[in-house]
Amino acid sequence: MYQVIVDKNSDGQRADKFIKKLLPLAPASFVYKMFRKKDIKINGVKATEKTMVRAGDVVDMFLYEDKVKAFQEEVQIENIPTHFTVVYEDENILVVNKPCGLILHEDDKEKKQTLVNEVLAYLYRNGAYDPHTSQGFVPGPVHRLDRNTSGLVIFGKTFEALKDLNEMVRLRHCIEKRYLTIVAGEIKKDGHLLGYMKKDEDKQKCFMVSSSTPGALTMETKYRVLKHQKDYSYLEVELVTGRTHQIRLHMASISHPVIGDRKYGNFEVNKYVKEKYGLHHQLLHAYQLTFKRSFGSLSYLNGKVIRAMPDGKFEHILNDLF
């Protein structure tokens, strides 16, 4: 018999979901067969798949330990080096400054060196996460940044925090996100952009469309001019909605594309900044997060502002142009 005590990150889950997370490599048919054969008990009582587990519950499974290990993934994150910097951390959340060039999640080309894996390695080394005892819970990010966009990313370290963060993101206007960028052309006044966009999955590119286009999504962006000269403008941009490539697409739509942006940008401008500064990607940095309306396990964050200013190449180009 294999016994496990439910921890707080698994509190309130259905028993079948809990067992699937505990044994991720076990076929679903095997898991449900265990329930049918009454091979799973919670606090000494035979459980069904719909039984809710609570923190502190004792779960007994009629399985040998070697069978349990065979159904659990071999996770190796201990030796992954980290390239981000920690900007804020408490027992519930972690906010990191992602460098340009680091992908958030794994893709076909990169399976190991991702921001998610680096954060898990960091939390493991600091004793905040252990994949071998986590009962299937994995800390994770609640929003995305493109590979070549640098800046702040929020991670939930506990199940409750991750659930509350996801709900705050879903509701919008709970977490305000602001970016810094340099765009082509001179902009003298602040602006507020409203429009509609649609993503072409085959081309992996977004397009401005009319409101009547099937599948069109509303897009709203605000920007404030920080500095300007005849050829370039330095902007603070606020995302009201959070669409794919939103800042890059919206600024390009008013003929002020983000410099270095090979997907939506100006060819001549990109050629110039590439030759002069070695810039091969969009110059975009997520620099500020404001918790405007926090609730649940994160209510204590209400009103908190977290910042990380750009450095390196961004800072060099900014100082040279302005």
Image (cartoon, helix red, strand yellow):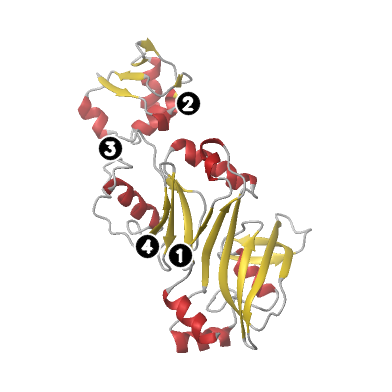
**Reading the chain from its start, which is encountered first: label 3 or label 2?**
2
Determine whether 25 is above or below 260 in the image.
above
Judged by depth in the image, the label closer to the viewer, 1 or 2, is 2
Q: Position of residue 114 (x, y in %)?
A: 37, 58
Q: Residues within 10 Å of mark 1 (few under 14, many from 20)?
A: some
Q: Give the residue type that dot 4 points to.
A: Lys
| Image-quadrant location for residue 214 | bottom right
Q: Is residue 189 visible?
A: yes
Q: CA distance from mark 3 to mark 4?
A: 27 Å
Residue carrying label 1 = 147
Judged by depth in the image, the label closer to the viewer, 4 or 1, is 1
The numbered dot on residue 109 is 4
Residue carrying label 2 = 12
Q: Residues within 10 Å of mark 4 (few under 14, many from 20)?
A: few
Q: Is residue 65 left or right of residue 291?
A: left
| Image-quadrant location for residue 98 | bottom left
Q: CA distance from mark 2 to mark 4?
A: 37 Å
Q: Secondary structure at mark 2?
A: loop
Q: CA distance from mark 3 to mark 2?
A: 21 Å
Residue carrying label 3 = 132
**Reading the chain from its start, which is encountered first: label 3 or label 4?**
4
Q: Are marks 2 and 4 in contact (CB under 8 Å)?
A: no
Of the pair 257 and 90, the residue shown nearer to us: 90
Q: Give the residue type that dot 3 points to.
A: His
Q: Secondary structure at mark 4?
A: loop
Of the pair 312 and 143, the residue shown nearer to us: 312
**Reading the chain from its start, which is encountered first: label 1 or label 3?**
3
Q: CA distance from mark 1 to mark 3?
A: 29 Å
The residue lying furthest to the top in this view is 45
